[in-house]
Image (cartoon, rainbow, N blue to C red):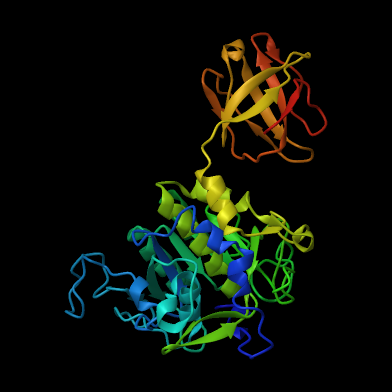
Amino acid sequence: MPQDGEFEENKSQAKKPPAEYWQSVIDLESSKALGTCRREVIIGVIDSGVEYAHPALQPNIWVNANEVPANGVDDDKNGYVDDVHGYNFLDRNGDPKDDHGHGTHVAGIISAVPENTGVSGVCGEISVAALRFINKHGIGTVSLAIEALNYAVQMGFQVSSNSWGGSTFSYQLRRAIARANKANHLFVTAAGNKGIAIDFVPEYPAALNLPNVITVAATDEHDRLAKFSNYGRMTVHVAAPGVNIRSTYPPDTSARLSGTSMATPIVAAVSALLFSVKRTTVVKVRHAILSSVDKLPQLRSRVKTGGRVNAAKALKLFLDDSPKQVRLAPFPETSKIAHTRPNTVMVDSHFQDTHIRCAQKEIPAQHEHTTLPIRKKTAFAQWTTGRLWNWIMRTPEGPIGQCGMQTHSGGSGRTV
């Protein structure tokens, strides 16, 4: 079932870049001054299992405190026996040990501890659960992937890292990911390694349009889209480093692999970082990551955000609750200052009897509707500092102007 691409990862010992370039380009060191991952946040690695005894991984392997190891009893009554570190959905037992290597490599990118092997991941502290559905040949089934995801949701994991996929659409998989969204679970997935535009030749789950999905392309050491990486202006959200990535490998060593499989856990781990610093929602985490990318010319028409993930910028935006301002220019010419916060607009008493009929980002972005009275605040789906907004005001006599691509009666403002 894995398309790989992902499981055709390049193990060659090509010329190595400077020491772990990927951690530098995502600004990982700067992010540590703003916040760090916490053990209470759990990432489910839905993959080929994890070598949980690996010295660089063992400190951050999830432990199910409600399950007694190896007693043959489903102590926590969740339907899975001896699921202490995750579960082996292939062999129907509580030992999700990796006999392929892929899942162990993914887990190390998230959580490897450098003191033991010199390999370090994004998170110094986190909990990684091993959810094995892929066999030693790199093959898995959609039904087992769904079961693994359902387990992650059932157990309250905030994030799953999904470096797998295929060309066949599954309604059942889509429905499972949609259910995960209702449980505030973020599903991070790989774009795939065929070098194709999945807007037109879809791969799944990468091409699924769901509010809790982040699809990740891969960049190389020069911040270019990797030659093997799938892309898509409508379906692929963001890029992350995915070439020549050093991480853990069974049984106790390391390897350098390349693939969108390697980019995906970087974004999953940054997501976990945001979940760690304060209680939040998938919507806010996803927005912070996708609104704070480093814009790259090579990615402008290749991924939705036009950029590569930046951990420090994402965390800074996520933590930013400081008041913003936008100048409203209501019809016909008068201006007022509105005090705002990310995702909301606040207006003063002058506007209490009005409604914003819609707000429209700079042409040709889609407009966003609201019919809420402006008593205190009106919420919008997106907020980006420096973005031009166009306002349509509703008065007691009716709307002023129309909400359309070319009509912006009512005024405009720029967020600051």
Of residues 33 and 331, the one nearer the viewer is 33
Q: Residue at x 78, y 63 (%)?
A: 298
> Which residue is found at the position 50% from the left and 86% from the top?
254
Residue 152, visible in the rendered structure:
yes
How far from the left and from the top, in percent, is residue 333? Answer: 78, 14
Which of the 4 image quarters holds residue 340?
Answer: top right
Give the quadrant of the N terminus. Answer: bottom right
Is 41 on the left or on the right of 77, as rendered?
Answer: right
Q: Which residue extends farthest right?
A: 406
Question: Looking at the image, can residue 186 be seen?
Answer: no
With respect to residue 316, does 191 lie above or below?
below
Coordinates of residue 240 in the picture (x, y in percent): 63, 66
Q: Quadrant of residue 163?
A: bottom right
Eyeballing the image, is 206 above or below 410?
A: below
Residue 278: image location, x then y, percent: 41, 47
Q: Quadrant of the C terminus?
A: top right
Q: Residue at x 51, y 37 (%)?
A: 321
- Image quarter for residue 213? bottom right
- Residue 85 percent location from the top left of the image: 31, 74
Residue 82 left/right relative to 228: left
| Number of numbered tags placed on the structure image | 0
Residue at the image point whose x is 48% and y is 70% from the top: 110
Q: In the current view of this chain or complex, which residue is farthest to the top?
A: 397
